[in-house]
Image (spheres, rainbow, N blue to C red):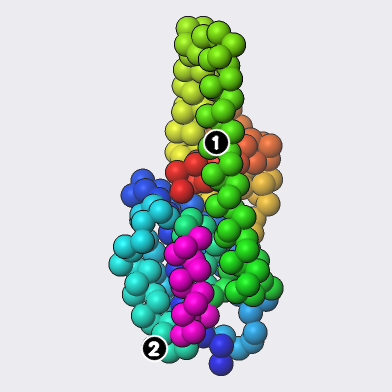
Amino acid sequence: MRQFVIYKRVSTKEQGRSGLGLAAQERDIRLYLDTYAEMPFEVIGEFTEMQTGKADDRPELAKALDLVRKTGAELLVAKLDRLSRKVSFIATLMDDKRVSLRVAAMPNADKFQLHIYAALAEQEREFISLRTKAALAEAKARGVKLGGERDATMKRNDAVKAQAKRDAEKVAGIVMPLRAKGETLRQIAETLNKSGVPTARGGQWQASQVQRVIKRLEEAEASEA
């Protein structure tokens, strides 16, 4: 029988308490098990970490890997960046012959393909950082003032985004578990309305509003990962 050890990670304690990020990971893992896992299977352990993906010292991951090595089970994660954002860490793990890794979002990927994906993702993050710095340097060289009205506009935009994020997090405990169960946007909106939960403006929920909430929650998870 195929055995799995599940590992989930969120970046902050706030995400852990609210379920933000965890619900999406649980959804992806369940989709993999229901659709791609060889039957029959058994989940012999689940571990959840609240720590940044840049850190190598993660006690829950250590426990999960220890169980994998002892039992021969597969380590199952929702996405590769939940395991780590460092290609060196992932490469070292893949060199361990006692560890078999499975990524729910890439159900048919082998170790080689996962290694390539991790390397490309790391290069992309580094390039985006360099591109941003270069654009700022070029603007400064042209005499563009990076403060003043531009900063005021950015602050207003940041304030709007922050409020939207807070509004989304207020209903995360309802929306994300329902989404993880496979309910449609319309069904989630109906549940919120029947429960007497108003929108941020005090109105009735529509499917499009639920979709925006889910998008904001997922964007917040990605930015804080």
Which residue is pictured at 49% across the width and 77% down the height? 95
**Residue indicated by mark 2:** 70
Residue 56 highlighted magenta (yes or no): no
Whether residue 146 is situated above or below residue 185 in the rendered picture: above
Does the rendering let one see residue 172? Answer: no
Placement of the N terminus among the 4 image quadrants: bottom right
Under circle 1, the secondary element is helix
Res. 10 image quadrant: bottom left
Under circle 2, the secondary element is helix
Res. 56 image quadrant: bottom left
* Closer to us: 92 or 43: 92
Mark 2 nearby-residue class (10 Å; few <14, some 14–19, many ≥20): few
Mark 1 nearby-residue class (10 Å; few <14, some 14–19, many ≥20): few
Which residue is pictured at 59% across the width and 53% down the height? 121
Judge from the rendering whether residue 15 lies leftward or rightward of residue 177; answer left or right. left
Q: What's the amino acid at mark 1?
A: Leu
Whether residue 14 is situated above or below residue 168 in the rendered picture: below
Q: x%, y% of residue 223?
A: 49, 41
Give the distance between the C-alpha atoms of the residues marked 1 and 2, in whole angstroms.
42 Å
* Closer to us: 205 or 62: 62
Whether residue 38 is situated above or below residue 157 in the rendered picture: below
- For the record, the magenta segment spans 87-100
Q: x%, y% of residue 78?
A: 55, 64
Q: What's the amino acid at mark 2?
A: Lys
Q: Which mark is residue 130?
A: 1
Q: x%, y% of residue 48?
A: 39, 64
Which residue is pictured at 55% across the width and 36% down the height? 130
Label 1 or label 2, whichever lies nearer to me, is: 1
Sequence order check, earlier mark of 1 and 2: 2
